[in-house]
Image (cartoon, grey):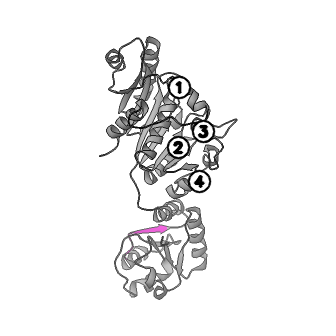
Amino acid sequence: MHRPLVITEDHALLDDLVRIAAAAGAQLDVAHVPAHARPYWNLAPLVAVGADQAEAVAASSPPARDQVLLVTRDLEDADTWRKCVAVGAQAVVTLPVDERHLVERFADAMEPEPRSGTVICVIGGRGGVGASVLSACLALHASGSGHLRTLLVDADQLGGGIDALLGHEEASGARWGDLVAREGRISSVALQAALPSFGDLAVLSFHRGEVAAIPPQAMRSVLEAGRRGFDLVVVDLPRHLDPAAVEALTRANATLIVAASDVRGILSAVQVLCEARKHTSDLRAILRPGIVDDDMAAASLGIPCAGTLPDQPRLTATLNRGELPKLGPRTVLGGLCASLLRDVLPS
């Protein structure tokens, strides 16, 4: 991958730019004069021209291109915008005021061709109905049979860890505790490299033991990186919506409510729906068998039924052995996952 190009002879400015690029996980190609920049001009994903070299760059008449910035530390320079136009820059970046913006521009420049991932949230209408199992199965099916690059996000800090549900609690890689201190943008490349991965599936879960709540800005950064770097992001939500869960709901393309078809199960799911509706609009029910028939259950919930999930007598034993359920097209779980993904993912 080609690196961002910096053209400056101002050593203090260059030191700032190297530091800012490092914060974005980027390395730079540096040219002190325009002649040295010529081989990199069209290849670099981003060009930052120091104000000290603006006149010289303009005089060299480089080919027009996008992603060119003029970088200055002089707020009082009345000639700044003329220099910006002369070098063909699209924007002026003033340090240190625009430092965070420049970090994001460098990070963007280092991203591969961005994806436009779909976000699916899954939430239980009450405890024990299998929302986490459905989340894991959706992610496994998408990354396995569907060959989609998939991110499975555990947002339930008291759920015991979705990595344990998959039998991978000992896998090396980052957990939420390693990411919550991050502010601002997370590179999708860095996120994929940091997380435990199994084929096309990456998993973000919690450390064992005491865990802290996920700051909403951390959830926002992870989901934005997930959408850029993955085809599908599946988020396993807690029933009690904390600020991070709300952040996920606001970004969901679809939210699945897993509801037990009995009186208390429906009443509980209705209460969860009342909260979820405040933050998202595309809500669909996955029904578990009970004394209430599917039509009555869906009518009581007031949302479309996206599928039914019959009891799986051997599923708990399979998961407790650290084994994964079979998700072939002829299995109940495999058929449900395939149907849900067809309905939610863009064609």
| Front tag of 3 and 2 | 3
Instruction: For the residues labelled 2 and 1, say whether their Cβ atoms are less than 8 Å apart.
Output: no
User: What are the residue bounds of the magenta stretch?
Assistant: 88-93
Rounded to the nearest whole Å, what is the CA distance between mark 2 and mark 1? 34 Å
Instruction: Say which amino acid is labelled 4.
Output: Ala
The residue lying toward the viewer, choosing from 269 and 80, is 269
> Mark 1 = which residue?
314
Mark yes or no: residue 117 visible.
Answer: yes
Rounded to the nearest whole Å, what is the CA distance between mark 3 and mark 2? 24 Å
Rounded to the nearest whole Å, what is the CA distance between mark 1 and mark 4? 34 Å
Rounded to the nearest whole Å, what is the CA distance between mark 4 and mark 2? 16 Å
Mark yes or no: residue 251 visible.
Answer: no
Instruction: Compare marks 2 and 1 and give the one earlier in the sequence.
Output: 2
Instruction: Compare marks 3 and 2 and give the one earlier in the sequence.
Output: 3
Instruction: Compare marks 1 and 3 and give the one earlier in the sequence.
Output: 3
Q: Residues within 10 Å of mark 2 (few under 14, many from 20)?
A: many
> Which numbered disc covers residue 167?
3
Instruction: Say which amino acid is labelled 3.
Output: Gly
> Mark 2 = which residue?
219
Residue that sits furthest to the front in the current view: 330
